[in-house]
Image: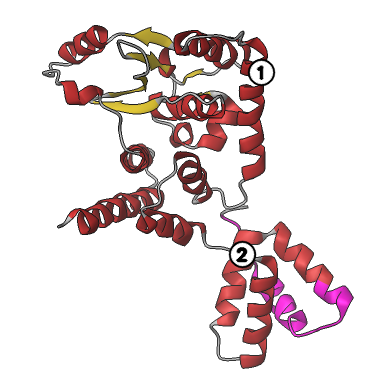
Amino acid sequence: MDNERLSVDLKDALLGLLDDTSNPVRRALLLHFTQHSPAALSFLKEVAQGSNRVLAWHAKWFIDELKFTDPVAEFKGFIRSLNYELETGALLLSRTVAPNLDIGACCTALDDMAARCRELIIEPATTREKCRIINRVLFAEYGFHGNIEHYADPLNSFIDQVLSRRKGIPASLSLVYLLVAHRLGLTLEPVALPGHFVVGCYLEDKPFFIDAFDKGVFRSTEELFAFLRSKNLVPKTIDLAPTPVREVLCSSCRNLVKHYTAAGDREHARLFNEFVEEFEATHERHAQP
């Protein structure tokens, strides 16, 4: 219903009922607005900003009662806050295109996968052994995999879609891996290589990396350097450093600009470009001495 619009006749009918304070009418309107929230929010905002003060007051009452929020404004507020947390940011990002996103369902799915991993982990276990268990659960039991056939599908970048469809691109599959690992108390890190995305583990004598797009294959430093050379890039140690959450989320937005542009969806491409600009402007403001 994200693209739903209320008809003129329905708007007129709603306007005729908006100032009716009887309980049955109030309950019926609340139910209707809840079921059609994106269109309802647009309608109520329009009335709240209109010249009819009585209807404007009632429209604001419904907005407050339903606790409608503007997901785009909410994500921009998150960007400006500098309080970057990966799971929160990923969920807020998804809500910008799916305002009715069931956040609880996403968190429960991640909890369930982590719980399954705990069932299989036999302590004491090394970090590498625990990662092998995560691989088994995510890629063998749950069937997560890289969406090679439709790599540029924008849905590959949204955590709710990746969880429900069990496919994505390197960044989004790595995100799922990280969120499950964090629930297990493992300190793994996102690593945005030039042209690829992996999960990094720096807890052992030698760091190793997990390629979630390739069903969790472990990669060594030497193997990743060889990968970069195969792309005609000169490997640098900094390439394998953990990537800040800010840049992980900004990179997801850049991917979405590219993928929505390729799909001919200029409106969404423009929206995610705004998020990229917001990340960059916020970082620049706070990076200055």
Image coordinates for residue 244, horizontal then vertical, percent: 32, 38
* Mark 2 → mark 1, Cα distance in angstroms: 35 Å
Q: At 50% across and 8% down in the image, what residue appears? A: 129
The quadrant the C terminus occupies is bottom left
Magenta stretch: includes residue 8 = yes
Q: Nearer the viewer, mark 2 or mark 1?
A: 1
Q: Where 207 sits versus 75, above or below?
A: above
Q: Where 5 sits versus 164, above or below?
A: below
Query: Residue reaching furthest right?
Result: 24
Q: Which residues are magenta?
A: 3-26
- By what rule are the colours in the image chosen? secondary structure
| Residue 5 shows up from this direction | no
Nearest the viewer among 120 and 239 is 120
Residue at mark 1? 116
Nearest the viewer among 29 and 285 is 285
Q: Where 172 sits versus 101, above or below?
A: above
SS assignment at label 1 = helix
The answer to which image quadrant residue 50 occupies is bottom right
Q: At 63% across and 17% down in the image, what residue appears? A: 118
Residue at mark 2? 68
Direction from residue 173 to residue 82 in the image, left or right: left
Magenta stretch: includes residue 25 = yes
**10 Å neighbourhood of mark 1: few (<14), some, or many (≥20)?**
some
Q: At 40% across and 58% down in the image, what residue appears? A: 76
Task: Give the mark nearest the N terminus, 2 or 1.
Answer: 2
Image coordinates for residue 161, horizontal then vertical, percent: 55, 34
Amino acid, disc 2: Phe
Nearest the viewer among 100 and 109 is 109
Direction from residue 4 to residue 16 in the image, left or right: right
Amino acid, disc 1: Arg
Do the CB atoms of the residues marked 2 and 1 lie less than 8 Å apart? no
